[in-house]
Structure formats: C-alpha cells, structure tokens
Image: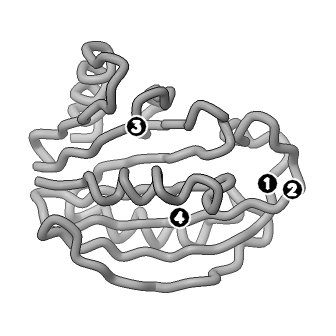
Amino acid sequence: MKNVLVCCLFAVLLSAGVRAETLEHPQAGLKLDVPAGWEHHVDGDLLIASNPNDDVVLIIYAATDGTAKDFITHIATEMEHLIKNPKVTKGPKTEKVNTLTQDYLEGTGALLEGDKWIPKGEKAGESVDWDLTLVTGAKAPLVVVAFGKLADNQKVIDAVYRSIKK
C-alpha cells in the first residue's frame, strides 16, 4: 500500500500546475492541498513538502490502520531523530475537520547536525517548532509532521490541515 501511495502522489505531483495542488490517495480515501509555490518530492514512503522560503518542512505519510498508531508511537518516541531535545508544548489535542479526526501534538526542539530535512537558511542547533498530526476517519490514516518556522507560516500550515478531506 505504501508503494501505491508513493506512485499516486508522484503522478499527481507530475501533472499539477502552479496553483494549489490537490493530492489524492484513492486507497486511503484522502485528499489534501499543497500550497502554490511549495516544492515537494517523494523520499521512500514519505512525501516531503517545503515552503518557498524553505523554512518549513512537511513530512506526509499514509499508512494502513494496522501501522498508523505504530508509526505515530515511533515518531513520537523517536522524535529525537528529527529534532534534538524535543519538548511537547501543546497537546495531545483532538479536533474534527471535514468529518475527520485530527489528533496532534506541538513542540519545540533544536535542529540536528546533518539532518537531510533541515530547512534552508537554518543551522543545526537552532531552535525549531514542530507538530505531529494523525488524521483518521477515512480508509487509512494520514500522518503529517511539520517543523521549522511554524509561527511565521501558521496560516498556510493551518490551510493544509483544513484541506485534508475524504
């Protein structure tokens, strides 16, 4: 299923224009909009998107029901592989968006040395905000990890989360 996700997302990315792009995953039954001007690519089973300033990175992953909670647990407990000294500042919190449930945590930490996802213009050791969201209520859950200068980009990031629908 992960390979199907990657193929579907890659096909949508190749055919999209300059406006906000709607990514679809038929097996998961989910869609989301990536804002115009954002760059994105597939890295293994992950869709990586970054804003035009390269100071925010979104890591998006669809999973089967059997693996989503394991994935969230893994990311939450292993966040130190993405962020040094991760600290939860908000959550867990649950919201209903477009008939889906979004469970999320927000926090802070520092960028790791040599991390391939460090937003451009940022340096290892600098403070960074992050959030981790699990979207359920469709055929399969969607996991989104965002990090970088989230406060400066909150409206756009919120629009991505509000765009997630069946």
Q: In this view, does 17 lie to the left or right of 45?
A: left
Nearer to us: label 1 or label 3: 3
User: Dot 2 corresponds to which residue?
Assistant: 126
The amino acid marked with disc number 4 is Ile
**Residue 75 got which mark?**
4
Q: How far apart are marks 2 and 4 (CA)?
A: 21 Å
The amino acid marked with disc number 3 is Pro
Q: In this view, does 69 lie to the left or right of 91?
A: left
User: Dot 1 corresponds to which residue?
Assistant: 111
Residue at screen point 79% across, 54% down: 111
Pointer 2 with pointer 1, Cβ within 8 A = yes
Q: In this view, does 107 lie to the left or right of 35?
A: right
Disc 4, SS = helix
Nearer to us: label 2 or label 1: 2
Earlier-in-chain disc, 1 versus 3: 3
Nearer to us: label 3 or label 4: 3
